[in-house]
Image (cartoon, rainbow, N blue to C red):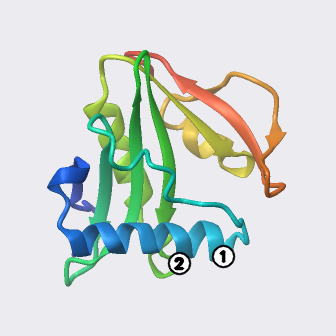
Amino acid sequence: MDQSSPDVRHQRFAELDPVVGYRLWALRSQVFVVEQAAAYLDLDGRDTETGTWHLWCADDVGMPVATLRVLDDSHVWRVGRVATARAHRGSGLAAAMMRDVVALCPDRAIVLDAQSHLRDWYAAFGFVVTGAEYADEDGIPHLPMRREVGGA
């Protein structure tokens, strides 16, 4: 796969191939539960909601190596679960997915809770900090961020 222009796929839950879905959730568990030692239930019931988008990039054999989800929270879109397999980090996959989020969700503000060290990275997509830093239940510092409709 040409990493300079990654193929970002976006699908609703019902459109996901079962093997792809399994690999998306396995990737999220590897990154958040194992690598970040955050013991929480990743499968929170929101992946199957009709308004949820699953964005992902695949390797050369079609297996997911980066993913995020976008939740329909009525008045805003909510980005979360942004994860890239260790071997593919730094290759622009997450940035390509974020660009697609902005294009896919032009009608409402987009919000997210960014790990604090990624503040500037999300700012590059037009997100601004909207509140005080907080630590999640696993002690990881986060910042609430928002991108307005038509944001830079």
Q: Secondary structure at mark 1?
A: helix
**Residue 149 versus residue 55 in the image, above or below:** above
| Extreme residue in the front direction | 45
Residue 127 lies left or right of residue 50; in this view the side is right
Q: Quarter of the image for the N terminus: give it.
A: bottom left
Q: CA separation, marks 2 and 1? A: 10 Å
Mark yes or no: residue 2 visible: no
* Residue 15 occupies quadrant: bottom left
2 vs 1, front mark = 1
Indicate the position of residue 33 as horizontal and vertical percent values: 64, 70
Residue 122 image offset from top left, x and y in percent: 56, 40
Q: Residues within 10 Å of mark 2 (few under 14, many from 20)?
A: few
User: Does residue 97 lie above or below 105 as drawn?
Assistant: below
Going by the numbered disc 2, the residue's amino acid type is: Arg
According to the image, label 2 marks what residue?
A: 86
Judge whether residue 25 can be spotted in this image: yes
- Is the C-beta separation of discs 2 and 1 under 8 Å? yes
The circle on residue 83 is none
Q: Residues within 10 Å of mark 1 (few under 14, many from 20)?
A: few
Q: Which residue is mark 1?
A: 35
